[in-house]
Amino acid sequence: MSSGQPVHFNLVAAAHAAMLEHGFQPDFPQGTDKELAAILSDDRLPEGPKDLRSLLWSSIDNDTSKDLDQIEWAEKLADEGPDGRIRVLVGVADVDARVHLGSVIDKHAQSETTSVYTGVKVFPMLPAELSEGATSLNENEDRAAIVIEYCVDASGAASDGKAYRALVRNRAQLAYPSVGAWLEGTGQAPAKVAANADLAAQLKLQDEAARRMVGARFQHGALDLESMETRPVMQGDQPTDIARQEKNRATSLIEEFMVAANGVMARHFEDAKVASIRRVVRVPKRWDRIVQLAEGLGTTLPAEPDSKALNEFLLERKKADPERFPDLSLSVVKLMGPGEYVLVRPGVEAPGHFGLAVQDYTHSTAPNRRFPDMVAQRILKALVGGEAKPYSEEQLGAIATRCTEMEDAARHVERDMQKRIAAVVLHPRIGQIFDGIITGVNQHGTFVRALDPHVEGMLIHGAKGLDVGDRVKVKLVGTNPARGFIDFAAA
């Protein structure tokens, strides 16, 4: 029988405890309030940057995002014809203009390295008064920014990259679901877009540039992976359901713009012969297992890692079996291994990003939520201003190591909380039957994912003879939010 009753469990307290358990310091240190007051009392804009506030900038992010890191603008170069180049500008919040190197807030950010999104509470790397206020590119607010510029040709290649300081103003804060549906022709234009023909034309042009670039990256072997991302549906402070987050044309637009912008920044540092931090995903060490996985599905992959061949296999499987494709994607992601941050010295070839099919990739577009991006803009500003390097190579190496460690810790916190949230959401549904798919069989047990909502648990009864990919009907028999356990039995 279904319990029918919600479980009373303090998810916010659990999230705070998980942060501490995994090495974070979720509470800001002594001295933060004094620094913050000084920062917020000075609302002057810096002198010297280009003034680009008149451009029709817009942002696209999640519905719930408050820490806005980027805005975008594009124009078709008039003298190059209808299929000519499109000039793209990505404005990135100049966090360094407010958070100074060596300050209390900066040292805390360097230790945490990332904001952590637990579903029930955001633990920001920077105080919310900055990341959601003074350093966020909020609508109709004048802000200091780093602008990354490049041109996209008909083949999708980006060239003429440059980066510089500027003043900007976000004219329209938009969200992925509504913009994506409009671009795909499955929904009405968002109200701000419907009311502004110039904004509509601007977004269509940005979409054209992004579609050129994604096509070019797939030609070079970028992987078309589809992770199963979910978010809790909240009523007050309690989750009541779990919704799947769908990718669409708007998410693809922003992804392509950011990949290109991060490439511009990496090449800028390389050309200037300065050390920097790059984000890399190395050639998969477990390529042999990926080959075995493909063989089991009737495809022969090359013996040596080949991202183009792997992507062709993935596209084929996505078309043949879309229901199970997220599980295949997850397997490939795990076998590729996690990304990492590395020090790149001048003149030394850096490993590339296997999954993105790019050789040059420096995180630089989300400084409100990632510390490597703050580091990148400090290196850039020192270059532009002819100033001393803000970090030594030894310091950059230590920062890269710390960022890798804490990003892994953040994944553990977020995964732990996803399990706890799912256990809370499903508790009233104990006794109900769900359609599911077997996602794992190992020495720890057999794991099954319910398809609606998308949550994973252990199959504690009736698992004999089942293997990965088998479709099953399962009965929910118990949940334990404190431990993040969800138990099913074969129905």
Image: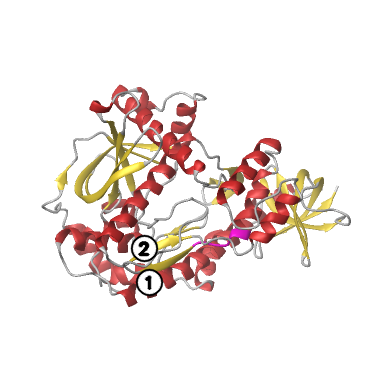
Q: Residue furthest bottom?
A: 394
At a point 66% along the width and 61% down the height, the residue shown is 484
As shown in the figure, which amino acid type bears the numbered disc 1? Answer: Ile
Q: Is residue 337 magenta?
A: yes
Q: Position of residue 150 (x, y in %)?
A: 29, 43
Residues in magenta? 335-339
Q: Between 394 and 41, which is closer to the camera in this rendering?
A: 394
What is the residue that sits farthest to the left in this orientation? 47
Q: Which residue is mark 1?
A: 399
Colour style of the rendered protein structure = secondary structure
**Residue 173 shown left or right of residue 332 in the figure:** left
The answer to whether residue 47 is left or right of residue 91 is left
> Which SS class for mark 2?
helix
Taking depth in this image into account, of 433 and 23 the one nearest to the observer is 23
In the picture as drawn, the residue positioned furthest to the front comes out as 303
Give the percent coordinates (x, y) of residue 21. Answer: 54, 73
Instruction: Report the residue at 15% width, 60% height from top.
Output: 385
In this rendering, is residue 242 above or below 30? above
136 within the magenta span: no
Q: Amino acid at mark 2?
A: Pro
Task: Give the mark nearer the N terminus: 1 vs 2.
Answer: 2
> Is residue 490 visible from the viewing direction of this image?
yes
The residue shown at (14%, 54%) is: 46
* Location of residue 243 with respect to 409 vertically, above or below: above
How far across and down, in percent of the image, does residue 98 sit? 23, 60
> Cβ–Cβ below 8 Å for labels 1 and 2?
yes
Q: Nearer the viewer, residue 395 or 443?
A: 395
- Asked if residue 331 lies left or right of residue 49, the reply is right
Query: In which image quadrant can residue 370 be found?
Result: bottom left
**Structural crowding at the residue carrying mark 1, measured as other residues with C-alpha within 10 Å and reported as few (<14), some (14–19) or many (≥20):** many
> Where does label 2 land, which residue?
372
